[in-house]
Amino acid sequence: MINRTLSNVVLALIVIIWVVPFIALVATSLRSEMATKTSGFWTSFTPTILGHRFSTHEKTDEVKSEQLRGNIFKRINKQKEWFPVSGTVQTIMFKGRVPDPNNPDKTILLKKLVPVGEIMEVRGGDFIFETNGDFIWTFPDGSKLKPKKLDVFINQDPVFAPEAYVEVLIDNENVPNALISSFIVTIPATIIPITIAAFAAYAFAWMRFPGRDWIFIGVVTLMIVPTQLAFLPILQGFNGIASWMMALQELLTDCEATDTCAVPSKSFAGLWITHTAFAQPLAIYLLRNYIVGLPKELLESARIDGASHMQIFLRIILPLSVPALASFAIFQFLWIWNDLLVALYIGPSNSVERVFPILLEQQLGTFGDKLHLLNASAVISMIIPVIVFLAMQRYFIRGLLAGSVKGG
């Protein structure tokens, strides 16, 4: 009983640790810029007292009677498209000069909060307001009424709007370009290593050749090599290839006349190759453990019927290995989509071809004081991996555990 309770508590804590930051990201991305700067995300789900400034009327409005009627919420929301203010009016800040009680010949500046229903003097007239925002301003006949700006405090209802998403997706072309670049990198860098690893895993599992077990051990051992150690030789290799391609282009074409001989050393192809190389040890290990556990009788029957290794692989192994392929595809997709380090050193860095993690890192400077825009970009970057995981989750655990419960 105690162990079950402890496990439930630990599971609940893990869920809270993962869910609360996501709720904070989404809530902040749907709030206004002013709200994100003045209060935390936890205040966005309950009414909050916030201050606003409104003008009693426009300069062009004609006041034809001794009373001016209006509504505070309508005045505030006149210029608001995304985040209309609603709730109940609490107080209005009165600011004006009144006679000094200690010196009748002088005046003092008085500031006080006027509650609902109390008459306040505004430019020689009586101003009164209600909790629903309606106000009446009564003034002497014949006076020239000018607009008056007042500060009001409202117990404001929660309001959410997708303004930040419209701004980062439509008004700012950097986010759509980064999304496209991430897809260009992620899809091939997920498919290519799975394809290569599937062929290699079948060979290690069911084909006999000299040194098979030692080669497999060597491939698996590569998983312990830190990624950072490989950056220098990879960069040197890509720089050498780019120099060789530029020399070949100068030799075969007249590129010097048009100044087009330069070949970039950082490109999408470099990211595909790098991610494919880094993914092979884990991919081969997972797929081999799964394939080696398939029924041996099934493959022997196929061989008796005259099937070749390619036919066995395509018609038997691949259909039966879908759970393992899907589980690795999830790992690889999430890793590449969220990768910053490899993309920063190997991938293109120009504004058109940079991938989404690099854009997010750069937005920390450009959107540092605009949390709603930064959080909107972060939520957009999370949507695609979540969709991929939910679509393939039924294969996830089955594919990962297959090699651990079957002998090979």
Image (cartoon, rainbow, N blue to C red):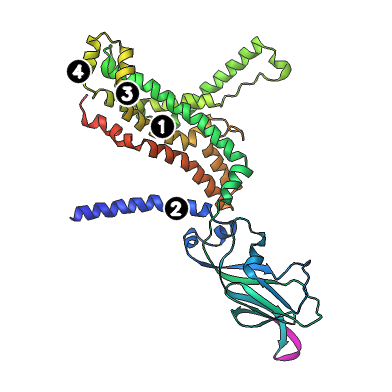
Dot placed on the residue nearer the N-terminal end, 3 or 4: 4
Q: Indicate left or right for 325 with 140 as reference.
A: left
Which residue bears the numbered disc 2? 23
Q: Secondary structure at mark 3?
A: helix
CA separation, marks 3 and 4? 16 Å
Dot placed on the residue nearer the N-terminal end, 1 or 3: 3
Q: Secondary structure at mark 1?
A: helix
| In this view, the mark in front (4 or 1) | 4
Q: Amino acid at mark 4?
A: Glu
Q: In the rendered structure, find residue 30 and report the number of the disc placed on it.
A: none
Tell me the quarter of the image containing the C terminus. Answer: top left
Q: Residue furthest top?
A: 306
Q: Amino acid at mark 3?
A: Pro
Dot placed on the residue nearer the N-terminal end, 2 or 3: 2
Q: In this view of the protein, can residue 41 be seen by the observer?
A: yes
Percent position (x, y) of residue 375?
Answer: 52, 49
In magenta stretch: residue 107: yes
| In this view, the mark in front (1 or 2) | 2
State yes or no: discs 4 and 1 in contact (Cβ < 8 Å): no
Which residue bears the numbered disc 1? 332
Which residue bears the numbered disc 3? 319
Q: Amino acid at mark 1?
A: Gln
| In this view, the mark in front (2 or 3) | 3
State yes or no: discs 2 and 4 in contact (Cβ < 8 Å): no
Q: Residue furthest front?
A: 64
> Is 106 in front, or is 219?
106
> Is 332 in front, or is 385?
385
